[in-house]
Image (cartoon, grey):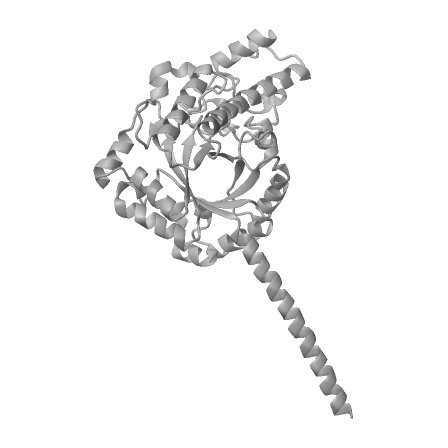
Amino acid sequence: MPEVRKTGKFKILVIILYLFSFRSALALDNQIQVNQTVARGIWVSVFSGKKILYSEQGVHNLIAQCNKAKINEIYLQIFQSGNAYYDSKICDKTKYDQMVASAGLDTLDLLLREAGQHNIKVFAWVNILGLGKNEKADILNKFGNSILTRDQYQRLSKITSSTELDKYYLREDMIFLEPGDPKVESYMLTIINEIINRYPLFSGIHLDYMRYPSPVPFIPGSRFNKFGLTYGYGPMNIERFRDKTGINVLDTLNNEDEYLAWDNWKRQQVTDLVRKISSLVKLKSASLVVSCAVIPVIERAYSNAFADWSAWLEEGIIDYAVLMSYSKDSQFIKETVKSSLGHRGKGKIYVGIGAFLMKDNPDLFFNQFRLITELAPDGIVFYSIDDLTDQVIGYLN
């Protein structure tokens, strides 16, 4: 009898374990199906050592890698530091000419066609306000340095000479255009218009450097100017604000209301440029997508870089933001992503993973990828194509 009772209990235990395993398998299968619906993208920089657009084979290799890694979106940088890596009639296209000469054909057109055949979307990645260190950019040749933004001490963000202040603040050390200058707005709209008309097979525009410089340490607004650096003090921006409010920001900002008015003005200049770019793109075709790479810490983006991307999503002027969540600190990534996902508004939130930081630690990459996937963003984008190794692809599959 005791033996019979043990056998009965054993059978019951087996049945319970089987049912539990079956339900767990179903849950895991469902999660995999959900994860597969999340967009998966890759940034392809002009600095890529693979020189993808310099040969026909490079294009084939990119498509093959994307298929292998189940990547269905390519963010292709074609305008960087004021240089065109596409067939431009507006600005310097020396780099594009070099690609064509090397490949013997227009590899950008080839990539767009081949990607379409494989159901891979390609977005034109455009650096809007950042010029790198290119002091000979076409826009500067046309309009001069007056269109560049400055800090409250009237210095450019690019370091030309060190001062006592540089012991305490870390500038981005690159040239930034002033979004509050109408000449900058007009020029960049012309660039965007040229791209979407010359290359109708692009699935949309991906904006980058859509912000003011963000030095370290960063301060939360102009009322703390004496403790750090802020930008927006380009000549035309100052003049336009003075004409509107009667306040000369170089002389004095007397109270909290004036500081807030100035900060709101700067945010509005960035937002207005995003809105006009988006309107131009959507006028061409409502199916074209507008996205933007953004600082993932929303408070810093809002109060220091004056890029109110949460409002852009709320208003619907961009379709989605891509968080540049580049860090080895996975807990920091988790907290910032969780916070940002609450700001979808009318759009979506993608998360950018800095694979380049984890070249020597693929396990960290996989754990971070899994962590972010579990938070259920609308898409994941990897930076960059050069870091998409066979081992990483294995993890993704």
From the top left corner, tell me how far across and down residue 377 is, in percent: 57, 45
Quadrant housing residue 185: top left
In the figure, is residue 224 to the left or right of 132? right
Q: Residue furthest right?
A: 1
Q: Is residue 310 above or below residue 338?
A: above
User: Splitting the image into 4 quarters, where does residue 96 fall?
Assistant: top left
Residue 345, by quadrant, is: top right
- Residue 364 located left or right of residue 123: right
Residue 194 visible in rendering: yes
Any part of residue 81 in sight: no
Q: How many circles with numbers are drawn on the protein?
A: 0
- Identified at 37% across, 33% down, the residue is 200
From this view, report whether residue 254 is shown above or below residue 71. above
Q: Nearer the viewer, residue 160 or 363?
A: 363
Give the side of residue 345 with respect to residue 141, left or right: right
Residue at 60 percent of width and 29 percent of height: 315
Please determine whether, in this image, residue 154 is positioned above or below residue 326: above
- Percent x, y of residue 154: 48, 16
Q: Locate the N terminus and report the quarter of the image it occupies.
A: bottom right
Q: Residue furthest bottom?
A: 1
User: Where does residue 188 sit, x and y in percent of width and height?
Assistant: 42, 23
